[in-house]
């Protein structure tokens, strides 16, 4: 059963009551919320995702609601709870759905230590994963969003989950977080992309989430083998170009973007080394998304 | 100590500290020499091995370079000086 099989009233009933058990890749989250913005966001972005029975297993139990104080009425806010605790500062109420997404990212990166987790987008083609590690503001999510509308499958926009035993990338197809100018870039580049209403004045600027493609959600059980590590960097006016990145340096870039690399110790080092062994490593500068998509199309076709 | 090399550059994992370091080609050669010798090596021995067949002046430069690398290894906890 997928979320779209539920009526809006049943979705709201579950969110307001026992919780909605939503599966994204290997992770099941029980979500509760009385907020319409959360129901809207979940309905829009997780329509194709499987939902689980309420008596089954869930990895995380989260809730996004108004705080229980006067702020409830004055400058309304939203709070993210996990197991009844609120680990983050409340945010303005209109940021309730982004808060849920950011909270889920934290749940996974801070707890799913069966995987090596890196701050990277990952897309797949013909079973081969293109890993895009990069700091915020580099154009990683824009490139990721663009590529999944040009024949690549979304594995993750934010968290690269790697099975240390097999070196394979585990799909975690969830909404792609677009910020500021990239929202209009993607609207122009992929008119069919489904985006949420932009939320302004977040700590990341204006944010809109883009729905994962249905194909990406449907194929959540198809793992991928790492084939490329590419560090993207948007530069206005730059011609799209790949430059070889020495593997040892690519390794260190991955380490620097690791959420739980240190947790895995020597086994993590060895697992990441196997991933780097499998990959061609590059830096990538681009100034035009269409040109970038053509370059990656050629890369996937020729190698 | 666990390490991997790609095209001369080495990444090394220090199990004692849990940290990972990138070493350039020269530092990588010094590390491999150290790891290959069962009871360590002196700066002079390392420099001689690395400057084999070179002039005395280059031997001195090699010793200075090795000393600098060993100081960095000590800072990172990758290798330690032995007073004996």
Image (cartoon, coloured by chain):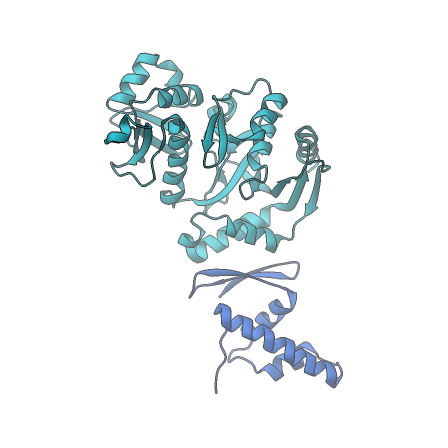
Q: Is residue A144 above or below residue A43?
A: below
**Residue A99 lies in quadrant:** top left
Q: x, y (%) of residue B24?
A: 63, 64
Query: How many numbered badges does the structure rendering display?
Result: 0
Q: Is residue A19 above or below residue B84?
A: above
The residue at the point 31 percent across, 41 percent down is A87
Q: x, y (%) of residue A143?
A: 60, 33
Q: x, y (%) of residue A15?
A: 29, 22
Is residue A152 in view from this perspective? no
The reply, left or right, for residue A44 in relation to residue A278 is left
Work out whether residue A298 or residue B74 is closer to the camera in this orientation and state it: B74
Q: Please, which residue is most extreme toward the bottom here?
A: B84
Work out whether residue A222 or residue A144 is closer to the camera in this orientation and state it: A144
Q: Is residue A243 above or below residue A157?
A: below
The residue at the point 40 percent across, 53 percent down is A263
The reply, left or right, for residue A216 in relation to residue B62 is left
The residue at the point 44 percent across, 23 percent down is A45
Q: Please, which residue is most extreme toward the front here?
A: A74
**Residue A265 lies in quadrant:** bottom left
Q: Which chain is blue?
A: B
Work out whether residue A205 or residue A86 is closer to the camera in this orientation and state it: A205
Q: x, y (%) of residue B43?
A: 59, 81
Is residue A289 in view from this perspective? yes
Q: In the rendered image, which quarter contains the N terminus of chain A?
A: top left
The residue at the point 61 percent across, 83 percent down is B45
Q: Colour of chain A?
A: cyan
Q: In the rendered image, which quarter contains the C terminus of chain A?
A: top right
């Amino acid at each position: 059963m997928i979320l779209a099989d539920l009526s809006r009233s049943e979705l709201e009933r579950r969110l307001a009551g026992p919780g909605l058990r939503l599966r994204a890749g290997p992770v099941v989250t029980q979500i509760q919320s009385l907020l319409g913005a959360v129901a809207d966001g979940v309905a829009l972005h997780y329509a194709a995702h499987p939902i689980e029975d309420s008596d089954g297993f869930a990895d995380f139990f989260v809730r996004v609601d108004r705080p229980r104080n006067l702020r409830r009425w004055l400058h309304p806010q939203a709070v993210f709870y996990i197991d009844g605790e609120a680990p983050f500062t409340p945010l303005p109420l209109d940021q309730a759905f982004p808060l849920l997404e950011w909270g889920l990212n934290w749940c996974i990166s801070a707890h799913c230590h069966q995987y090596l987790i890196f701050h990277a987008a990952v897309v797949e083609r013909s079973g081969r994963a293109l890993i895009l590690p990069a700091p915020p503001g580099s154009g990683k999510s824009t490139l990721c969003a663009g590529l999944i509308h040009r024949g690549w499958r979304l594995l993750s926009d934010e968290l690269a989950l790697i099975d240390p035993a097999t070196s394979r990338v585990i799909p975690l197809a969830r909404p792609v977080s677009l910020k500021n100018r990239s929202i209009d870039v993607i609207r122009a580049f992929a008119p069919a992309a489904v985006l949420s209403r932009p939320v302004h004045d977040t700590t990341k600027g204006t944010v809109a989430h883009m729905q994962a493609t249905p194909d990406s959600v449907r194929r959540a059980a198809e793992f991928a083998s790492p084939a490329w590590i590419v560090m993207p960097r948007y530069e206005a006016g730059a011609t799209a170009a790949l430059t070889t990145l020495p593997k040892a340096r690519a390794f260190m870039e991955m380490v620097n973007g690791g959420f739980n690399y240190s947790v895995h110790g020597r086994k993590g080092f060895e697992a990441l080394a196997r991933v780097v062994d499998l990959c061609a490593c590059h830096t990538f500068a681009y100034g035009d998304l269409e040109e970038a998509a053509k370059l990656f199309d050629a890369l996937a076709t020729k190698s | 100590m666990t390490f991997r090399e790609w095209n001369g550059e080495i990444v090394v994992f220090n199990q004692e500290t849990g940290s990972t370091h990138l070493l350039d080609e020269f530092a990588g050669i010094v590390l491999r020499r150290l790891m290959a010798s069962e009871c360590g090596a002196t700066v002079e021995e390392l420099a001689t091995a690395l400057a084999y067949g070179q002039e005395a002046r280059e031997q001195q430069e090699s010793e200075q370079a090795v000393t600098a690398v060993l100081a960095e290894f000590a800072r990172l906890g990758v290798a330690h000086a032995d007073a004996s």
